[in-house]
Every structure is written in structure tokens, then in C-alpha cells.
Image (spheres, rainbow, N blue to C red):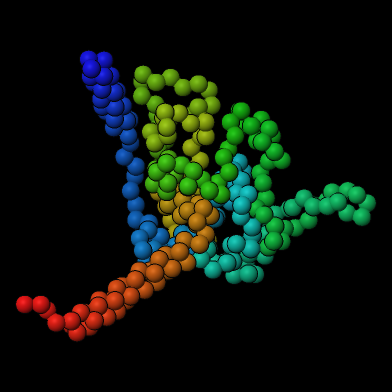
């Protein structure tokens, strides 16, 4: 009995210590208004198109998006570029294809059916170009990271000089929102880095929000249709509940109450 009591006390102390440590390490992420949140949430088309521009001009040199095709850029629920615009975007990339009639590989302009062009031939090439670190694929990055969009949005703005008591190795940077505060990716954003086609002021905050919105769409391209389906389901259940209520009320009204 005494051993059971001691074990119980030990488990309670371990749990309390763990929760206290977790609470101490928890970081409050930056907050912003996401248009796609909530039951009626929808993607901001302008933000999606700007986010694609940031991805292409800043992120695509290292990070792939292997689950996206260029045709997705023109589909409903996404950035909704026109088909002509999407074709121009696809054609601006060179795609390796083949073999041809001579058995050789060749390059050609991209087509709508092509997947987004990968920045590296393979994982080893990516690691060699980035000091041994592998830049993660961004297709579902929002879903793969705890904190989701708030984490990505905060991380892009979290670069700071390290505290005096923290020493960083070469090629490692301090980011207050990164797990462990150490990251091998240098700060990629600076005010005015991208010249937005729609004239929006490209501050670090704006670019972080736009590219994060684009990454959210990449991870959940059917989010809007899912929200619509959810609303219809709720409306159907409300109507069904009302009909059942009045039906039951009518049925019970025919039964005389016993005195």
C-alpha cells in the first residue's frame, strides 16, 4: 500500500513538472485576421495571388511544392488566375521531359498539367546546397507544423539578434518563434523585397501574411467548398429538427393526458 502511494505521488509530481515546463516554453504567436477562418471563411484572392508571387520570387529557390500543378492556380477556390495567366506562368518554367524518339531527355516550356518545378534534382542536392539542411516541401507545411498558419506567419517575422547568453554556430540564426530558437534558414524577407503587381505595399508583415495564406490554400485547396458543405449540413439539421419537433408535438397532442 505504501509503495502504491509513493508511486502515485511520483506520477503526480512528474505530470505537474512537465506541465509547468511546457507552459514556460510555450510562445504566444503573432495574431492577425485570417479571412478563411470561421464557418463562412473564404480566401482573399488578392492575398493568394500576392502569396504566390512571394513564394515564386523568394521561397521557390529552395522550397518545393510537389503536390501542386500549374492548373491549380486557375481553379475555383484558389488564386483564380485566368487560364491564360496560368498558361503564361507555367510556360515561364522549363520542365524536364522525355525521352524523345532518340531516347534522350529534353526540356520544354511548362504546361498547365505539369507539377510545380522542383528547385533541386533530389534530396541530396538540396542538402548539399543548404549546408546539410533539407528545405521542407511547402505543399502541406501549414498542416505539418504545430500552430499552423499562426506559427508560419510568426516565424517569418521572428528573426532577432540572439540574447547575450546564446551562442550560434555558423549558418544558424536566432528566431524567437522557432522550436529551440535556432534555425538554419536565414531571414528571407525585408520591406520592399517584392514589387506586388497590384501595387500593395510589400512590408514584411504583408508578405508574411500573403505567403502564409497561399500555403494555407495549398494545404487545403477545398476549404471553401468544405465550409459551404458544413453550412448546408447545419442548415439541414436545423430544418430537420424543427420538422421533427412539430411532428412529435402533433402526434402527442392526440393522446389524452391521464388524470
Identity of the residue drawn at 46% across and 51% down: 212
Q: Nearer the viewer, residue 101 or 51?
A: 101
Q: x and y percent of residue 26 in the render?
A: 32, 34
Q: x and y percent of residue 115 in the render?
A: 67, 54
Relative to 54, does residue 121 appear above or below in the rendering? above
Q: Nearer the viewer, residue 197 or 47?
A: 47
Q: Residue furthest top?
A: 2
Q: Residue furthest front?
A: 259
Identity of the residue drawn at 58% across and 38% down: 135
Residue 244 visible in the snapshot: yes
Relative to 133, does residue 93 appear above or below in the rendering? below
Quadrant that contains the C terminus: bottom left
> Relative to 131, is 191 on the left or the right?
left
Q: x and y percent of residue 160 in the render?
A: 39, 33
Residue 192 visible in the snapshot: no
Relative to 103, does residue 228 appear above or below in the rendering? below
> Relative to 111, is 65 on the left or the right?
left
Q: Nearer the viewer, residue 179 or 46?
A: 179
Amino acid at each position: 500500500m505504501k509503495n502504491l502511494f509513493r508511486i502515485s505521488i511520483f506520477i503526480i509530481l512528474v505530470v505537474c513538472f512537465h506541465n509547468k515546463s511546457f507552459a514556460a516554453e510555450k510562445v504566444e504567436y503573432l495574431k492577425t485576421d485570417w479571412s478563411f477562418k470561421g464557418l463562412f471563411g473564404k480566401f482573399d484572392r488578392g492575398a493568394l495571388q500576392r502569396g504566390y508571387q512571394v513564394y515564386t520570387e523568394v521561397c521557390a529557390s529552395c522550397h518545393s511544392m510537389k503536390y501542386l500543378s500549374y492548373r491549380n492556380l486557375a481553379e475555383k477556390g484558389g488564386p483564380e488566375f485566368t487560364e491564360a495567366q496560368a498558361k503564361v506562368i507555367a510556360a515561364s518554367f522549363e520542365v524536364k521531359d522525355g525521352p524523345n524518339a532518340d531516347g534522350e531527355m529534353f526540356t520544354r516550356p511548362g504546361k498547365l498539367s505539369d507539377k510545380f518545378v522542383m528547385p533541386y534534382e533530389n534530396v541530396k542536392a538540396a542538402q548539399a546546397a543548404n549546408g546539410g539542411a533539407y528545405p521542407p516541401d511547402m505543399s502541406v507545411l501549414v498542416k505539418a507544423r504545430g500552430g499552423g498558419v499562426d506559427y508560419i506567419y510568426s516565424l517569418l517575422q521572428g528573426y532577432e539578434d540572439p540574447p547575450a547568453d546564446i551562442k550560434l554556430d555558423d549558418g544558424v540564426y536566432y528566431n524567437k518563434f522557432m522550436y529551440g530558437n535556432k534555425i538554419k534558414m536565414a531571414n528571407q524577407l525585408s520591406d520592399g523585397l517584392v514589387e506586388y503587381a497590384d501595387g500593395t505595399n510589400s512590408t514584411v508583415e504583408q508578405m508574411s501574411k500573403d505567403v502564409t495564406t497561399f500555403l494555407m490554400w495549398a494545404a487545403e485547396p477545398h476549404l471553401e467548398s468544405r465550409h459551404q458543405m458544413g453550412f448546408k449540413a447545419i442548415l439541414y439539421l436545423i430544418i430537420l429538427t424543427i420538422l421533427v419537433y412539430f411532428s412529435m408535438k402533433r402526434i402527442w397532442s392526440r393522446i389524452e393526458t391521464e388524470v
